[in-house]
Image (cartoon, coloured by chain):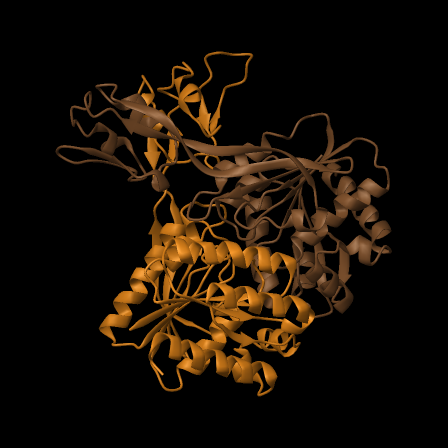
Amino acid sequence: MILTIASGKGGTGKTTVAVNLALSLMSQRHDGKLLFLDCDVEEPNAHLFLKPVITRREEVSVMIPQVDPIRCAHHARCTVVCQFHAIAALPNVTLVFPELCHGCGGCTLECPEQAIGEVPHTIGMIEEGRVGPIDFAHGILNVGEPMATPIIRQLKGRIRNDYDVAILDAPPGTACPVVESMRGADLVLMVTEPTPFGLHDLRLAVQVARDELALPVAVVVNHDGVGDTGVDEYCTAEGIPILMRIPLDRRIAVAYSKGTPLVEALPEYRDQLCQLFASIKQEASA
Amino acid sequence: MKQLVILSGKGGTGKTTVAAALAHLACQDSSIVLVDADVDAANLELVLSPQVREENAFFSSKVAVTDPELCTACGTCEEVCRFDAVIAPDERSDSDPYSIDPVACEGCAVCHYQCPAEAIRMEEPQDGLWFRSDTPFGPLVHAHLFAGHENSGKLVSEVRAQARKMASAGEHDYIIIDGPPGIGCAVIAAATGVNLVLVVIEPTVSGVHDLERVLGVTEHFNIPALVCINKSDINLETTLQISDYCARLNIDVVGIIPFDTVVTEAMVHGRPVTAHEDGPVTEELRRVWERVQASLGTS
C-alpha cells in the first residue's frame, strides 16, 4: 500500500504522523517490508527523528542542453520550442539558463543542425539507508535550485511491489511537488489542525487529492482542542473520515522540539497509531 | 519604498501571524502594500478581512491534448515524453489513440513538435486567479493557484509585480510580503529583489535544520536577513542555540516570541494578534517591527 501524508498547511504534524506511524508498525513487527520516503525535498525533516543510517548517496540531475558553437547555425529553433525560456539564441551565441530548464529534451530533438547535446545538471541528492528494518530515503534540493519535482520523481522510483507499505511524507502546499507526492497513492492522509488556517488549506489539499487525482482521503486532527469546530464540520459535510485525534499537548511539542519521536516520549501512542494504520487500510480498500 | 518578505523554510512556524501583525503595526504611521506570496495555501486573507476590488485570471502553463481523429497511434509521443504523461491505448487494440494525462504533463510541448501526424496541440488552461483587495491596513495583492496547477513561482512573480506597480504609483513606504514555506521556486520568486528577509522559526530540530537552508538561499541571492524565534519557550535551550548560531553568522535575532494561545485565538477571530490583545506576544512583535525598520534604515 502506498500512503501519502499531506496537509496543505505547514507545521500541522505531517512528519510527526508519518515518522511515528512507521516506528509503530516496526515495533509491532509488522510482517512485510516497509519503505519510508521523505518527499519534502525543500525542507526534509523526517531523518531528524528517524535517524537513519545512510548507506548510499546519489546525485539527482536534469539533462540540460549543451550547444556546440561550431555546428550551431543560429536558426533559433531551440528558442521557439522551449516553453520555459531556458535557451536564448542571440545573433552570435546561444545561451542556456540551467535553473529554468525542465530537462524535456525538446531543443535537442528539434535542432535542425543537431547542434545540441545534453549534459547532466545536478539539482540535488538522494540519500538512502535504513532505520532498523525500514528502508529509508529522502531527497535534498540544492540551495538556489527551484525545481523539486524531478527529485521526488526519482525518489518514488524506489517504490516496488515487494514493499508491503510505502509511507510518503509530502511537502506543504498544493503545487506540483505535492501533486507528484500524491500521484499513485492508495490513500492520502491529511494531517490538519482545527483552526481557520488548517481548514482553509485542508480544503485545498482535498481538492488536489480527491477531486483532481481521484484518490481516497482521510484526516488526522492534530493539536486537537485549539481553535474552532470548522474542520469537524467540514469533514462531516464532505464525508471525510477523521481517523485519529492528537491533542495539543506540551509534552508532544517539547519532544518534537528535541527530535524525539512521539512514540518514544509517549509510548501509549504506539497502539493508537497501529489502530490508525488498520483504519487506513480499511479506508483504502473501501 | 522598501520590500520586506517573511520566510521560514519550515511551514507552520508563524509567518502569516507575523506578517499580519507587522502590517497592523506598520499601517499606524506608514502606508503599506501587502502581498500574500503563498499562492498555493494563501492564509493572509483569513486575518485581514479583504474586500476584493479586482479579480484577474492567471494563465501560465500549457498542457498537451491529443486529437483522437488525427492520432495514428505511432507511439512517438510516449517515446519522447520524459514526464510519464502519455497514456498508451489499451494493448488489445493498436489503433486506439494515445492520450495525455494533464496532471503529469509538464507542458514542454516536445510531443506537440515531434508528433508526425500533427495530432497534438497545446492548450493554455487557466492556472489561477489573482486579486487586488482593500484591507483595514492597506491594499492587498493575493492569489489562488488552482489545485494541482503548476507555476506557483510565476504567480508569485505576478502578484509581486502588481504590488510594486501599486506601491510606486501610490508612494507607499513598504511592501510586506508573506512568503511561502520551502526553499524552491516559489520562495526564490518571493525573495529575489527584496530589501530584507525576516525568517520566522521555531526552536525545534526541524526549525533549526530548515533555518540553515533558508539562510543558504538568502546568502545565495545576497539578501540581508533577520531572524525571529517564535514559540521560543517550547525549548529554551534550542532558542539559545539559534541565537548563538545567528550571532556567528552575524545575523540579528530581532524577536523572541513566547508560545501563547492568544495567537490561535486571534486567528479564530480573524484578526492580527497585535489588534487582538496587548500582552507579551504583541509587545515582542512591536520590538520586531522597530528593529525591522532600523535595519531598513526607515526608523
Q: Is residue A73 left or right of residue A199?
A: left
Q: How many marks?
A: 0
Residue ID at (33%, 80%): B298
Q: Residue furthest front?
A: B248
Q: Classify B24 as above or below B231.
A: below
In the image, residue B33 lies at what x, y percent? Answer: 35, 72
- Residue at left offset 38%, top offset 47%: B126
Q: Colour of chain B?
A: orange
Query: Which residue is painted at 44% across and 82% down in the image?
Result: B290
A216 with respect to B218 (left or right): right
Q: Residue A197, how many percent across, how many down?
A: 58, 65
Q: Quadrant of residue B284?
A: bottom right
Most foreground residue, A39 or A244 = A39
Locate residue B10 relative to residue A5 in the image: left or right: left
Look at the image and give the colour of chain A.
brown
Q: Is residue A58 left or right of residue A251?
A: left
Residue A283 vertical position relative to residue B205 in the rendered view, above or below: above
Q: Quadrant of residue A81?
A: top left
Q: What is the x, y in percent for residue B226?
A: 46, 69
Q: Residue B134 versus residue A47: which sits nearer the camera?
A: A47
Q: Quadrant of the N terminus of chain B?
A: bottom left
